[in-house]
Amino acid sequence: MSEHRVTVLWTRTSPDFTYESYNRTHEIDVGLGSRIPGSSAPEFRGHVDRLDPERALVSALSSCHMLTFLAIAARKRLTLDGYEDHAVGYLEKNSAGKLAVTRVILRPKVIWAEGVAVSADDLANLHRLAHGECFIANSVKTDVQVESQA
């Protein structure tokens, strides 16, 4: 149905190339003149001030869930004024003993527009629908849990 292209650019900046010395910094070109500064996670000799693949995966899952939730709410004529998610991903060994982002917990907080009332059960159902339709969640093996915040 659609293609989504990015270009990852890396250039060696160290005089030698060993695990201890090579730079992890790179650029992620997402098109339209936008580049995201990337790196490995700090635990893997990366820079804390750059986006690492683990946080990129967690942000993709969180963003996709939010966008799907917004679409469902709009179709149901439920107006939101805000949405906030403090998502957490866990890098740990999977069942094969390999490092993987095995689980992500989304903690979305929805701020409904004045006059909109949604029960806790209906909110949970909206999040279940959003999770089931999220393209990114449907693309990964990671266990994604949604803990809706009141």
Image (tube, rainbow, N blue to C red):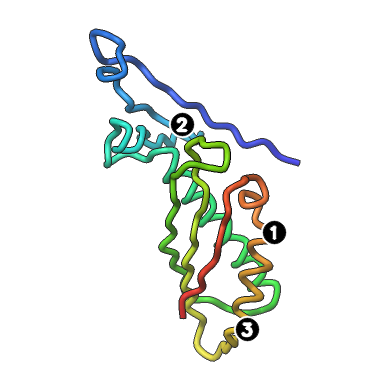
Q: Quadrant of residue 119?
A: bottom right
Residue 137 location (% of width, % of height): 62, 52
In-front residue for pair 24/29: 24
- Kindly report which numbered mark, 3 or 1, lies closer to the viewer in this rendering: 3
* Residue ID for mark 1: 133
The three-letter amino acid code for the residue at tag 1 is: Glu
The secondary element bearing badge 2 is classed as strand
The secondary element bearing badge 1 is classed as helix
In-front residue for pair 50/125: 125
The three-letter amino acid code for the residue at tag 2 is: Asp
Mark 2, residues whose alpha carbon is within 10 Å: few (<14), some, or many (≥20)?
A: some
* Residue ID for mark 3: 121
Q: Are marks 3 and 1 in contact (CB under 8 Å)?
A: no
Q: Residue at horizontal 51%, vertical 83%? A: 113
122 relative position to 30: left or right: right
77 relative position to 150: left or right: right
* Residue ID for mark 2: 29
Q: Is residue 54 above or below residue 27?
A: below
Q: How many marks?
A: 3
Mark 3, residues whose alpha carbon is within 10 Å: few (<14), some, or many (≥20)?
A: few
- Kindly report which numbered mark, 1 or 2, lies closer to the viewer in this rendering: 1
Q: Quadrant of residue 74?
A: bottom right
Residue 28 location (% of width, % of height): 44, 32
- Cα–Cα gap, marks 3 and 1: 19 Å
